[in-house]
Image: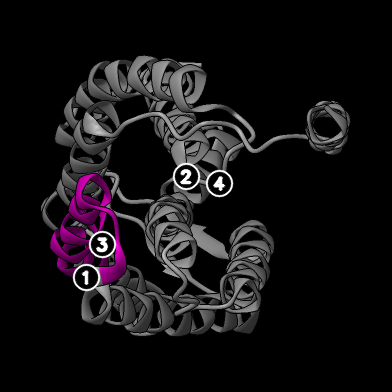
Amino acid sequence: MGSRPFMTYDSVAAAEIAIYSIFLIGGIILCRRHGFTKSSGWRFLIILSLARIVGSGLLLATLNDPTNIGLYVGWVICESLGLGPLVLMILGLLSRAFESMSRAGHDVVKPKWKRGIELLMVVGLILIIVGGTQADYQATESLSFKVSYPAISKAGSAIMIVVVALVGLTILAAARNQRYVSQGERRIIVVAAICFPFIVVRTAYSAIKVLGEVQGTVWLQLGMSTIMEMIVTLLCEVLGFTLDVVPAAPTDTEKYESGRSHRRRHHHRSKRQHRDDRY
């Protein structure tokens, strides 16, 4: 079977496993704290962390099995999935800000807008995954892949560019209406605005690789992808630990019981008032 030497790509992969293991723990804590069912984007921290840990593990597995092309393909596909969770994480955080605006009586962005972006994102990710399995991979000794991407991959990459542009417009809308956001929630918009340039750079990396068919290098990946993702993930995790927990919305049963209790109290008050009037 043989083996191959330890390279710079492997050093990056080992560092990713260590760093994203910490991010994974933080993401789990945030999900438990804020709720797994809430749409604040914390679960996408977990998804991104798992994608990076699994992808890096696949690359390191090639040290002892360098001829297994499936390991390389799995690594490349996992690497291509980083942009999706980043965007969904920012979109989820912005949803919390828009919900704060709605409570103040200002519906700036309708839920259909967010669902539309998410739908485009899902379509783009599916195209990227399917295209990644159909791409032609030619690995060099330095692990610098020359990949011939099919049209389906290019379509997925183009959709991701559109999605990022729409997220940029969403951040702009949030910034223009931040006066309607409660004081403790305004930092969400600030962090989203800070993260957006890093997401743009990450998007540009995917575009030049897929649409421009530029051969990737470890330094290009490190500077335009790995570090960009880590910065956004770190900022979002720090933000998550500073935000207050939003109380869960009452269920239909709780609303019914609350209304029933209110009606009962009102009925008793009316009877007491009626007796007082008689006397």
Q: Does residue 93 lie above or below 123 as drawn?
A: above
- Residue at x 39%, y 52% (from the top left corner): 93
Residue 32 position, x and y percent, is 50, 17
Q: Which residue is the site of mark 4? A: 39
Vertical placement of 180 versus 232: above or below?
below
Spatial CA span between label 3 and label 2: 30 Å
Residue beneath disc 3: 216
Which portion, as a residue range, is magenta? 180-200
Tell whether label 4 touches label 3 (CB within 8 Å): no
> Quick one: label 3, few (<14), some, or many (20+) residues within 10 Å?
some
Q: Which of marks 1 and 4 is in front?
A: 1
Whether residue 138 is visible, yes or no, is no
Q: How many numbered marks have been drawn onto this rendered protein structure?
A: 4
Q: Sequence-wise, which precedes: disc 1 or disc 4?
A: 4
Q: Is mark 1 on a helix, strand or loop?
A: helix
Between residues 192 and 269, which one lies in front from this camera angle?
269
Please identify the quarter of the rendering in which residue 147 is found: bottom left
Q: Is residue 35 left or right of residue 225?
A: right
The answer to whether residue 199 is magenta is yes
